[in-house]
Image: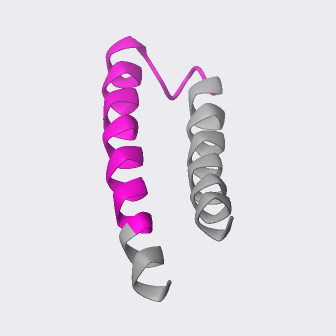
Amino acid sequence: MRNGFTTGLIVGGMIGASVSMMMSSDMMKGRNRRKMMKTGRNLVRKTSHLIGDVVDLFH
């Protein structure tokens, strides 16, 4: 339960920040938006692995 909650909290926060940045249209244009989405996916993947490792250390 704790592992899923922590992961969900962090990933949800990152998704919320990304969506709010994408909604501001003056900041994001086509190419930048695609680049940020690709970077965000990679970041989520790396973060989820890192969180899993940290939780395993304390478990």
Give above or below for 22 relative to 39.
Answer: above
Q: Residue at x 63, y 53 (%)?
A: 8
| Percent coordinates x, y for residue 25 in the rendering | 58, 20
Outermost bottom residue: 58
Please give the name of the residue rendered at 42% of the width and 46% of the height, measured from the top-left corner. 44
Instruction: Please provide percent x and percent y for residue 52.
Output: 42, 65
Picture residue at 40% right of the left edge, 28% below the top: 37
Does residue 44 belong to the magenta stretch? Answer: yes
Q: Quadrant of residue 29?
A: top left
* 38 drawn magenta: yes
Residue that lies at the very extreme toward the top in this rendered image: 30
Residue 18 vs residue 5, the one in the foreground: 5
Q: How many marks?
A: 0
Q: Position of residue 10 (x, y in %)?
A: 59, 58
Q: Position of residue 19 (x, y in %)?
A: 62, 32
Segment tinted magenta in the rendering: 24-52
Main secondary structure found in the magenta portion: helix
Q: Quadrant of residue 34?
A: top left
Left or right: 23 as drawn, with respect to 39: right
Q: Is residue 1 above or below residue 41?
A: below
Q: How is the image coloured?
A: one colour
Could you say which quadrant of the image residue 17 lies in? top right
13 horizontally vs 43: left or right: right
The quarter of the rendered structure image containing the N terminus is: bottom right
Which is nearer the eye, 2 or 21? 2
Residue at x 66% of width, y 36% of height: 20
